[in-house]
Image (tube, rainbow, N blue to C red):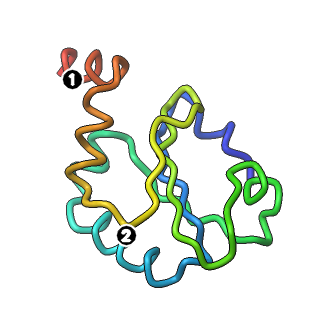
Amino acid sequence: MDLDSYKWTNRLLVVNSSAEQGLSVQKKTFAADPAETSDRDLLLLPVSESESELWKKFRFQNGEFKMLLIGKDGTIKQEYLEPTPMGSIYNAIDAMPMRRREMNRK
């Protein structure tokens, strides 16, 4: 999997898929308000150990919940070590300069 294809198009929540319970909770939270995630061009991407390049890059550990918010520029903006309410993630996104410009255009 190559994240470059998302650059300048989407923000990503990259999640360690081996933390099954945490991933399940985060998926439900993410799916609860599709209009908000869509408005922010946000995608949830579980990463498994079989995708070893990303697994190593993000230093995921088997069974440990870790989620990274990656901006449209491809850089890590936030790291979360437990399932996180989407409101907190939206606040982090909405504070980003690129997102503020997007909101001003609407």
Q: Amino acid at mark 1?
A: Met
Lower position in the chain sequence, tag 2 or tag 1: 2
Q: Position of residue 82 (x, y in %)?
A: 41, 65
Residue found 30% across the figure and 50% down from its top: 37
Residue nearest the observer in this picture, 32 or 64: 64
Q: Amino acid at mark 2?
A: Gln
Displayed quadrant of residue 7: top right
Q: Secondary structure at mark 1?
A: helix
Displayed quadrant of residue 60: bottom right
Quadrant of the frame with the C terminus: top left
Q: Secondary structure at mark 2?
A: helix
Q: What residue would you read off at disc 2? A: 26
Q: What residue would you read off at disc 1? A: 103
Residue found 19% across the figure and 16% down from its top: 104
Residue nearest the observer in this picture, 17 or 6: 17
Residue at the extreme bottom of the image, as rendered: 21
Q: Is residue 49 above or below residue 104?
A: below
Q: Is residue 18 above or below residue 15?
A: below
Quadrant of the frame with the N terminus: bottom right
Residue found 24% across the figure and 48% down from its top: 88
Q: Position of residue 4 (x, y in %)?
A: 68, 37
